Amino acid sequence: MRILCVAAAYPPHGKGGGPKASETIAKALCSRGHTVRVITVADDESFEAHDGVQIRTLRSLNLYWNYWRKDRSAAARLLWHALENFNPRALLRMRREIAEFNPDIVLTISIENVNVATWVAAWSLGIPRVHVVHSFFLMCWRGTRFSNGKNCERPCLQCRISSIGKKFCSQLVDGVAAEASHTLSTHAACGYFPRAVSKVIPGAVGELRSSPRFRATETGPIRVGYIGMLTPNKGLGTLGDAAALLGPEAPLEYVIAGDGKPEFVQDLLSKFPADKTAYLGWVDSDSFYPSIDVLVVPSIWAEPFGNVCIEALSFGVPVIVANSGALPEIVEHEENGLVFKAGDPEALAACLRTIASHRRRLERMHHAALARAKQYSTEALAASWDIFLTQVRARAEEKATKRVTKSHLGVT
């Protein structure tokens, strides 16, 4: 098939797991023999190829592409979000790009900047549409469904108003996939993608480490790691409070990697025992995971997936996760990690005590982590996407044939 992947962010542009997931999907489809072109956005237009994937970069079809920057005026941000509901400029440009490539299917991976108008453009050309959900952006302008320190039980009035166009255009999507069932069910419950066939296709790690060593010793300190954005919804404060409860005498060391607002980061780090805590800032994950014994993912918000979890598992690192969103779909309690109540530092402290006191259990979790990671291979992801896209395309062609037949028979 000729597959056009339209991605909100694609390496080297953008932060977090989204760009990495986009690249993984595109390369996986290419490995199955498909012709794959990616359209993404950045500061300048370009066309290049990497690992068999064609990459066309456009200037933002909205006011700007880098929505991580915080120096935009309130008026600019308001107009940016309004245009995300339907952008005529995006419709015209994406229709031209789709017609030029002439794909068998259009796969949108997230949708910021390239816009929901892409679905309309593909629909107008009779090309089947599939969407990959990596966040809650379609129903929440923040993309998190998290406000005032807690998860939103339902979209607020502000989010409902600011997402009218996105929800309406989702009717044109033929297939929708997400990395976890929690993410799909959340969108379905709010009325998104009513005509689409859905499928859970978990993310993948690029390489499975077949035999990383178990680094914890019988008596040495356990190195507890965190990697990711340092923002309130990520819940690092829960880990800090747990560390304070355990005290400096606990046989634990803390390794924190990531970035956030300086004053917020400073406040977070003050919760940890200073002489047993290392703050690294942004680091390469391949060097981070071999340096820790257990990863903690203490998210308060409902994570749509949790790439850091499967990355850690591929290094044989057990994971302690909050029971938020999709995280319990990855980590099996008492098998490849532990699960605790989100936002509860006492529950997290109990998990850390368990890890520190039972080194043999930690070693068993290490081997279980490696076994679990095999379920998140790029080969498995590529096969799942191949089957799903073929299914959606066949379903769309069947519908089109029925419409033509009815038209010829004069049936309305």
Image: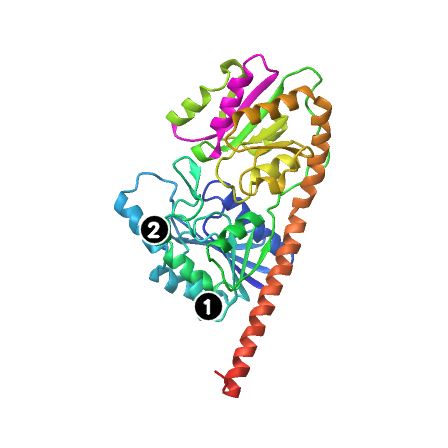
Where does the N terminus fall, quadrant-wise? bottom right
* Image location (x, y in percent) of residue 25: 57, 51
- Answer left or right for 73 relative to 138: left
* Image location (x, y in percent) of residue 367: 73, 33
Which residue is the site of mark 1? Answer: 123
View extreme (top): residue? 249
Q: Are marks 2 and 1 in contact (CB under 8 Å)?
A: no
Identify the residue at image location x=54%, y=24%: 346
* Image location (x, y in percent) of residue 34: 61, 60
Q: Give the magenta range.
A: 234-262
Dot 1: element: helix
Q: Amino acid at mark 1?
A: Trp
Q: Is residue 89 above or below residue 223?
A: below
Identify the residue at image location x=37%, y=57%: 164
Based on the picture, tell me whether residue 159 belongs to the magenta stretch.
no
- Answer left or right for 192 relative to 3: left
Q: Where residue 243 is drawn, which disc sits there?
A: none
Dot 2: element: helix
* Image location (x, y in percent) of residue 384: 64, 55
Which residue is the site of mark 2? Answer: 81
Identify the residue at image location x=56%, y=53%: 26
Residue 201 makes an appearance in the image: yes
Nearer to us in this view, 122 or 298? 298
